Amino acid sequence: MNEDLEVIGMGDAQEIINASKRISEIEDIKNEFHNHIKKAQPPKAVLGSVSLRDDVLEATCLGHTLQAVPRVVIAPDNSFAVEYHFNATYQKETFTVWCFYLTSNGTLNTTVDNKADGRICDYNNDYATKKIIVRLSKALLLSRVFAPTVLTSV
């Protein structure tokens, strides 16, 4: 018997092996999604753009460039997804403007638990980049980047 399996136990080892396999599968789906982004027809210039720089999803909209570093996460149902948080910096503070998830069934969702009401589209939808830009732009407009500065008197 393998020394590693003796230390952690067979049940734990199988759980880790299964998780590793599912992580590999979601990484493959992420790579397919990234390839689709590279080939996708860009949205109209007025909306903005989505591109890949190395493995980072970069979106430009409303005069701002936001980046999302993909990160594999585990959902409440124990499925895996890839999380994309688009961050902005305003007054030296970095914060999340909007995020979405690439789920193990190949959909883009606003929720990690893959609920139907959070569904955006399939990862290979011809309009995926447009749908991302529109949702990101709306979130950016509602963020503190565009919020008025409140002045208080002392």
Image (spheres, helix red, strand yellow):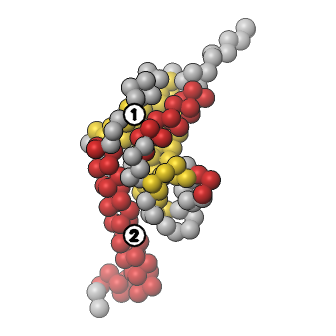
Q: Residue at x 45, y 85 (%)?
A: 11
> Where does the image place residue 91, in percent across and percent down from the top left?
51, 21
Q: Which of marks 2 and 1 is nearer the N terminus?
A: 2
**Where is 51 relative to 78, above or below?**
above
Q: Where is residue 54 in the image (x, y as percent from the top left)?
A: 26, 42
Query: Which x, y percent locates residue 129?
Result: 41, 40
Q: What residue type is labelled 2?
A: Arg
Residue type at mark 1: give it: Pro
Above or below residue 94? Residue 1 is: below
Examine the image and state in which quarter residue 48 appears.
top left
How far apart marks 2 and 1 lie (CA) works out to: 32 Å
Q: Give whichever of 40, 90 is nearer the camera.
A: 40
Q: Residues within 10 Å of mark 2 (few under 14, many from 20)?
A: some
Left or right of 111? Residue 29 is left
- Label 1 sits on a secondary structure element that is loop
Return the mark for residue 146.
none
Q: Mark 2 points at which residue?
A: 22
State which quadrant residue 9 falls in: bottom left
Q: Is mark 2 on a helix, strand or loop?
A: helix
The numbered dot on residue 43 is 1
The foreground one among 144 and 140 is: 140
Q: Which of 11 and 19 is in front in this view?
A: 19
Quadrant into which the N terminus falls: bottom left
Residue 66, position as x, y percentages in the image: 42, 32
> Residue at the spot x=37%, y=77% of the render?
17
Number of other residues with Cα within 10 Å of mark 1, as a class: few under 14, some 14 to 19, many 20 or more: some
Q: Looking at the rendering, in which quadrant would you find the C terminus?
A: top right
Residue 105: in sight, yes or no?
yes
Query: Residue at 40% across / 29% down in the picture?
Result: 44
> 30 above or below 57?
below
**So how many labels did they put on this image?**
2
